[in-house]
Image (cartoon, rainbow, N blue to C red):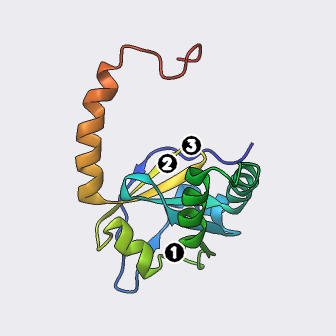
């Protein structure tokens, strides 16, 4: 099993579109990572091994399913492979910064096998909406686990 990403961090983008990865994740991502568009206008950051696992899973999905084709096109066409520099920074391509509305203040959250990069205001809005729903869940999201 690969790395597990947890927690919330608040780095800033510099003028060149670079972001410092949270120090606790730099070792797991030192060999490289893939950034791509995620749901809710955030960016997904995968270690290379996890991205390869997802690629394999999507390659077994039926090409005849329109949803699979649509998702795969956006997911792979927007993907950018990056290697952190010696300071632990990654450059986020302009097209991905635009998609996620990233300008300066960002939030990087651990989301199990990936990181997500959010615009700080977008994250605050999303979290305030979701925390209420999370606290009120009466059905098990993961039956038999939680």
- Checking the image for residue 110, the label placed there is 2
Residue 107 in the image: state x and y as whole percent. 36, 57
Q: In this view, does 77 lie above or below 39?
A: below
Q: What is the secondary structure assignment of the residue under circle 2?
A: strand
| Residue 69 sits in quarter | bottom right
Residue 27 in the image: state x and y as whole percent. 65, 61
Which residue bears the numbered disc 3?
112
Residue in the image at 24% along x and 38% along y:
129
Q: Mark 1 or mark 3: which is in front?
A: 3
Q: Nearer the viewer, residue 22 or 133?
A: 133
Q: In this view, does 140 lie to the left or right of 55?
A: left
Check contact, mark 2 vs mark 3: CB within 8 A. yes
Residue in the image at 43% along x and 78% along y:
95
Q: How far separated are the C-alphas under marks 1 and 3?
A: 21 Å
Residue in the image at 56% along x and 43% along y:
112
Q: How far separated are the C-alphas under marks 2 and 3?
A: 6 Å
Counting residues from the N terminus, which is met first, the one under dot 2 or under dot 1? Answer: 1
Counting residues from the N terminus, which is met first, the one under dot 1 or under dot 3? Answer: 1
Q: What is the secondary structure assignment of the residue under circle 3?
A: loop
Which residue bears the numbered disc 1?
89
Label 2 CA crowd tier, 10 Å (few <14, some 14–19, many 20+)? some
Q: Dividing the image into 4 quarters, which one contains the N terminus? A: top right
Report if residue 18 is visible in the image. no
Q: What is the secondary structure assignment of the residue under circle 1?
A: strand
Residue 2 in the image: state x and y as whole percent. 71, 47
Q: Nearer the viewer, residue 106 or 24?
A: 106
């Amino acid at each position: 099993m690969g790395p597990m990403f947890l927690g919330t961090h608040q780095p800033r983008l510099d003028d060149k579109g670079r972001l410092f990865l949270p120090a606790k994740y730099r070792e797991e991502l030192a060999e490289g990572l893939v950034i791509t568009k995620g749901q809710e206008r955030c960016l997904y950051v995968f270690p290379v091994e996890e991205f390869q696992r997802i690629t394999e899973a999507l390659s077994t999905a039926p090409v005849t399913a329109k949803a699979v084709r649509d998702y795969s096109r956006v997911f792979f066409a927007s993907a950018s492979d990056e290697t952190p520099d010696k300071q632990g920074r990654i450059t986020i391509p302009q097209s991905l910064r635009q998609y996620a509305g990233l300008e300066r203040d960002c939030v990087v959250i651990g989301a199990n096998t990936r990181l997500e990069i959010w615009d700080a205001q977008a994250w605050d809005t999303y979290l305030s909406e979701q925390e209420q729903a999370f606290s009120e869940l009466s059905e098990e999201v993961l039956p038999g686990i939680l």
